[in-house]
Amino acid sequence: MKKTTARSNVAPVAVAGRTLAVALLALGVATWAGCTRHPGVQITEGSAAAPHLLHAGTDAPDSIFLLPKADPAFVGSWGGELKVDPADARYTTHPAAPTSYYFGERNGTVYLRTAIYGRPNFPVVKTHVELLDSRRVRFQIDSRCDTCSPPCREVETTTLKLVGAKAMQAHLVAYSYWQGDGHEQVDYVGELHPLTDAELSAIDNQVRRNHVLLGRINAKQKSGG
């Protein structure tokens, strides 16, 4: 895995391959790679890409995405905190991302309800959901910052995997790149667990404190998987 820039006067920075002990994965919600132009440069809050946080989306109870082949064990509220891989900590000012998901069931079919929160200057331009197998689902969020200098695009891919009745692994790969000026990649991992109402409320407060609703993952009702 490498973090590098396109400029010839900056040497590529190699990050040693590492095993992600995915005790916990994820959305998220979100998220993310620092939008600085050169690896190793001090990241400031204004120059860093804001994490996109995936949240259960309680503000839109009818906005769902069907997952016909998903294991019924998904059903329920799941959440936790994703933490940046220590090797990537210098590339982001956001070391942790609170996240939650709600999976329901309708007529024997599992469905997902999830909203995307973040900063207004990084609007979401595309989303995608893919059921890899009955116990793994992958989300992708594409966003961009046209007011960044240079303009920045980001792609976040989160994979959730059921590993037990009370555990779900989450792995987020956040990739940022700038127009003619390089790219960076940051990994987040975590373990999600079933949430009580109080825990879901606490995550809700964290997500909404400094973020705005930017959209929902494939909000229209449709078939998936």
Image: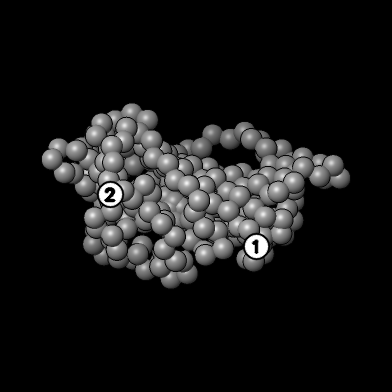
Question: Label for residue 64?
Answer: 2
Q: Amino acid at mark 1?
A: Thr
Q: Which of pointers 2 and 1 lies earlier in the amino acid sequence?
A: 2
Query: Which one is in front, 124 or 203?
Result: 124
Question: Callout 1 environment at 10 Å: few (<14), some (14 to 19), or many (20+)?
Answer: few
Q: Is residue 169 above or below residue 100?
A: above
37 sits to left or right of 83: right
Query: How is the rendered protein coloured?
Result: one colour
Question: Callout 2 environment at 10 Å: few (<14), some (14 to 19), or many (20+)?
Answer: many
The residue drawn where x is 24% and y is 34% is 68
In the rendered image, the quadrant that contains the N terminus is: top right
Q: Is residue 99 above or below residue 211?
A: above
Residue positioned most to the left: 107
Q: Is residue 155 visible?
A: yes
State the CA–CA distance, disc 2 to disc 1. Answer: 32 Å
User: Residue 160: x percent and y percent?
Assistant: 38, 40
- How many numbered tags mark residues here? 2
Q: Quadrant of residue 19?
A: top right
Q: Amino acid at mark 2?
A: Ile
| Element marked by disc 2 | loop
In the rendered image, the quadrant that contains the C terminus is: top left
User: Residue 5: x percent and y percent?
Assistant: 75, 44
Q: Is residue 23 visible?
A: no
Question: Label for residue 147?
Answer: 1
Q: Quadrant of residue 137?
A: top left
The residue drawn where x is 52% and y is 47% is 142
Residue positioned most to the bottom: 209
